[in-house]
Amino acid sequence: MNGNVDDLIDKKIDNIIKENNIYHTGKVTKINNFIIEATGLEEVFFFEKVYVKDEENVGYIDKITEDKVVIALVKMNGNIRVGDPITASGEVLQVSFSKNSIGMVIDPFGNDKMSGKKFNDSKLINIETPNIPIMDRSAVNRPLETGIAAIDLMYPIGKGQRQLIIGDKKTGKTQICLDTIVNQKGKNVICIYVAIGKTKKDLKRLYTKLTEKQTNSYTHIVATFNDDPVPLLKLTPYVAISIAQEYMNEGYDVLVCIDDLRKHADACREIALISEKNTGRDAYPADIFYIHSRMLEKGCQHRCGGSITILPIVETKAGDITDYISTNIISITDGQIVLSEKLFKKGQKPAIDFGLSVSRLGGAVQTDEVKKIGSTVRRELLSFLETSDVYQLVNIESLSEELQGKIFKGQKLLNLLNQPKYSPFSEEKLIDTFGYVVGLGHSSAVNALLKDIELTQRIEDDGTNNNPPSTPPSSSSIPQTTPPPVNESQDASNTKALSSEVVEQTSNPIIQESTINQPQVPSQIVETPVNQPTNVPVVEQKVSSTPPTNNIDGNGDSNEENKEDHTIEELMNDDEIEFNFL
């Protein structure tokens, strides 16, 4: 702190020596909320920092006319009246920034939002800097892994890319950003989350969740609340981009999540209307496209090795992505991830609309193996969605085997893409899981998923048992016995019921709560049939103690002992399965 005071004193002395201590003054002629009109400031320039009445009220020159200037206030700490003096500083409005603010919630001026204190080692940075020249940019070819399977496979994001996240309210837009931030742990990426006009309650919940996920060591949160001055909301994303440039120039990869640009556009419109600027479509200022483009154009891969990746969020109404602000930002960014409220209510999370989403970089930021699997997954999934819409009301058994197989595989892919929050997929897990489903990999990840499901079922079945369950026995420790012969007169619906139950557990990693209250018996290990390939791992399945009603043959004898174990390869190729259309 003493160093900052000494620097300030030295600067004042230098200004006196150089006769730069002459300041232009004016007076307030009109007050309209956070917009002030003043006269007498004839030699000011655009975005110059000014003081109104005293240094507690700070603003910047927002508009200059022949006989007056318009000032937008970013700090209002006192009553301002007509006739109060206004002093021009002769400097561009700047903000403070400290690297020690990492893990904290700060306002655009670099102050800690929680304690209200300033950081001792802060330095001044410009709110807006010149755009990065084309010659200083390089190709975007490195992936930024979000941990979300649907995005990393089909709509990949590269370091230096600008990818829009757009959708209605409460469809999981912010959650995609949070999942991406959590997935950057240990990857030498600096994350900046920008909250524009959020409530204090929402921001507190978000900060608590990020703290629980141990992201404080690499995440800044730049925030303005909904009760802050509107001009401060307008400057917030520009400050975050300037901070990102500071890190990029040092060779860091930076991720900036702006939540959201709809509120930012509304703030710009409010300022324009009150200051009587010329407005355009939907009463937004005529330069709203330039306001957003000059900010988002800072996202790039710099030749120094650093990069700025920007994920702007835009909220829509009734799923309309063709409104003015949405189409503007779609045309600026390198792709968009569209979220559907209809899919969200159906339980698909993340609720990505696979038909409207796109990434203009695509495979350029993917490894060869992920690119091959991702293109196959996207092609088969879109084909399934189109087929399910056409044959939604048709009896599935009346379709051809080819159509049944397409619908079956598409449903499996859709279930695997249904991903809980804060459960990221690594690249190896993506290749292992989805590569097997589309026939380009092996099944160890899917079999491991089955074992996790079975282990969770055992914990739920124990009920009052507080001790952790023992490790399931390996396939080598299971005694090898010949499976009992299958009774050919058995009702075929018995095998169909068992197959449907096992496949449902395989394709959906979420265990249904209804299985908790069902009576269970100790798990039984059923051996793999003799003719099964030896390189296929054995999957242990639990057998319910309550046999179904159709599990009794004509002689009244139970056919429970005739059930055969199904390996993962048999389940993936079984055509007799219950289909769930969207």
Image (cartoon, grey):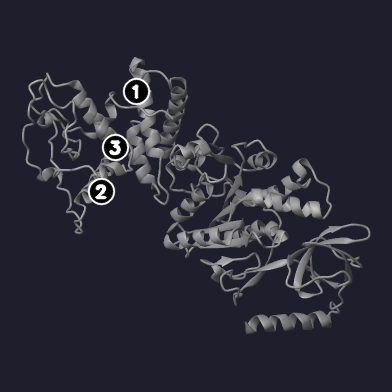
Amino acid type at circle 1 is Gly
* Precedes in sequence: disc 1 or disc 3: 1
Task: Tell me the number on the disc at residue 306.
Answer: none
- Left or right, 71 with respect to 483, comes to right
Where is residue 459? Give x, y as percent.
22, 51
Q: Quadrant of residue 8?
A: bottom right
On the rendered image, what quadrant is the N terminus found in?
bottom right
**Residue, disc 3:** 506
Asked if residue 425 is positioned above or below residue 375 in the image, the reply reads: below
Q: Secondary structure at mark 1?
A: helix
* Precedes in sequence: disc 2 or disc 1: 1
Amino acid type at circle 2 is Thr
Q: Is any part of residue 269 visible from this angle? A: yes
Count residues near mark 3 (Cα–Cα under 10 Å), then give few for <14, some for 14-19, many for 20+: many
Residue ID at (64%, 72%):
123
Residue ID at (35%, 15%):
398
**Residue, disc 1:** 405
Return the residue nearer the eye: 175 or 462.
462
Return the residue nearer the eye: 99 or 559.
559
Amino acid type at circle 3 is Thr
Where is residue 507? Give x, y as percent.
32, 36
**Residue, disc 2:** 456
Mark in the foreground, 1 or 3: 3
Where is residue 6? Give x, y as percent.
68, 84
Asked if residue 463 is positioned above or below residue 417 in the image, the reply reads: below
User: Could you tell me if the residues under marks 3 and 2 are in contact, i.e. CB atoms within 8 Å?
Assistant: no
